[in-house]
Amino acid sequence: MVGRVPADAPADELQDLWLRVRGELEDSLPGTTFSHWLEPLRAVSIQGTTLLLSAPASVRTWVERRYGETLRTALSHQAPEMTDFGFVDAEQAGKQARGAPQSLPVDPGHTFDRFVIGPGNRLGHAAALAVAELPGEAYNPLFLHGPPGLGKTHLLGAIVEYMRRNHPGLIVHYTTAERFTSEFVTSLRREGPELFKARYRELDALLIDDVQVLEGKEKTEEEFVHTFNALYAAGKQIVLSSDRPPEALSRLAERLRDRFLWGLRVELDSPDLRTRVALLWRLASDADRELPDPAVLKEIADRVPDNVRVLEGAMTRVMAIASLLSEPLSMPLIHRALDPPAGKPARPLAEPPSLEAIQEAVCSVSGLTRQELLSPKRSSRVARSRQLGMYLGRELTSLSLTEIARGFNRDHTTVLHAIRTVSSRLEPGSDTAETMHKVRSALGRERPGGDLNTTDPSRRPQKRGG
């Protein structure tokens, strides 16, 4: 078995994978068969779990019919996460070879199957699914908006996952407005704007999260207008998300706001009680534990009325206590996990601490200054403290990954890596768990029974929402 080859893998990694697959095919087939039918194949890119190949039209059908299973078997031997292959035509292969921009990773839990539908998001879900099924034909652009934590990022991820799985020949790019800006500025400095333009003009679908970040960035707005116009004119799919509707993005160029209204805009509202209970039921099912009395889930849902991410955080804490104490989910356990300590006033779960307060608490525990925490320094103490702050920013606030990244002078992918790293270190009794306990105590977020985040990370529910 070999290591995982990521989607959007660099060219050398992609070609290394294909050389290994070719070698296995050459060893398992007669020489004339390999040279005539399989030698002409070329690896172009990876979309999701599908390896895209180019080949002369004269050999594609025969390869799929006679050697498809042989090729899939060799592929799975060399990269177990790869499940299929597909063909793209010469023009499409040329696009891929010119190098599409690198997409952000998509949370594996962000699929349509795992999106809990309710009155507040039903239209958004239906529109996103229609766009994924018929890119460029259903609603273009699709503009999703609403406060953080209601599912915008989940829907964008679901569209990406669906397109890559069902339309493997399409070049699908998922990013944030902040990352788009960073790529544009970097291109201006290193290689000029033309290569940047060429890469984005070749896309078949462009999905941008947190588009409100473009406000006030005149040069990036100008480039995005041109990118938007080129893709829209070519019938390519555009999907955008924002924390506000287009007309409320007052510092955004008017011509961009107008373009955001050309297609369909959908607002995501806070989930009602039934939807919140359904989401908690899904999380309990995912944790592979005995399903609780619905009244227990309703008790949790009643406490967090507005934000899916904060609701998931509450459920995480409850399940962590249940796991640590080996107890079923029950009303007494919920009160133990979520009620404030005796003598202290209740602090609503829906009113999280600020990111600045989290940073100060981390600094006070780790002995750093806030300037050091936000600096480019990468020493072990600084890096671990910074990762812990990012993790708590995601856990205790309703901020998006992009907003947390901005607060730490980093990008979206750094925050995602930090969350995964801290999660992997939260074993009971570990240094990370102990530090977490101290920081949460400093924030006044500790509960009876100790640190609530020391449960086995594999049993913790996936984060969802925008």
Image (cartoon, grey):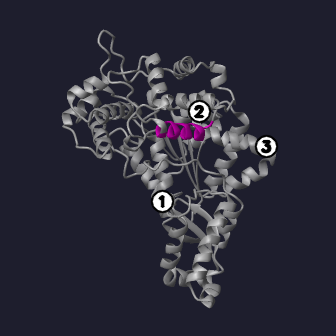
Q: How much space separates mark 3 and mark 1, taking CA atoms?
A: 34 Å
Three-letter amino acid code at disc 3? Leu
Q: Percent position (x, y) of residue 463?
A: 43, 40
Which of label 3 and label 1 is nearer to you? 3
At a point 51% along the width and 58% down the height, the residue shown is 135
Three-letter amino acid code at disc 2? Ala
Few, some or many residues within 10 Å of mark 1 (<14, 14–19, 20+): few
Q: How much space separates mark 2 and mark 1, taking CA atoms?
A: 33 Å
Q: Percent position (x, y) of residue 262?
A: 55, 45
Q: Earlier in the sequence, mark 2 or mark 3?
A: 3
Asked if 105 appears above or below 7 in the picture, the reply is above
Q: Earlier in the sequence, mark 3 or mark 1?
A: 1
User: Which residue carries the number 1 mark?
Assistant: 134
At a point 63% along the width and 34% down the height, the residue shown is 410
User: Which residue carries the number 2 mark?
Assistant: 405
Residue 186 in magenta stretch: no
The label number, if any, that marks residue 188 in the structure image: 3
Asked whether 412 or 335 is in front, the reply is 335
The label number, if any, that marks residue 311 in the structure image: none
Asked whether residue 168 appears in the rendered view, the answer is no
Asked if 165 appears above or below 358 in the picture, the reply is below
Three-letter amino acid code at disc 1? Leu
Q: Percent position (x, y) of residue 307?
A: 39, 31
Asked whether 239 or 14 is in front, the reply is 14
Dot 1 falls on a residue whose secondary structure is: loop
- Which range is magenta? 411-424
Few, some or many residues within 10 Å of mark 2 (<14, 14–19, 20+): many
Residue at the front extreme? Answer: 429
Look at the numbered discs 2 and 3 and tell me whether their residues touch, using CB distance below 8 Å.
Answer: no
Asked if 433 appears above or below 223 in the picture, the reply is above
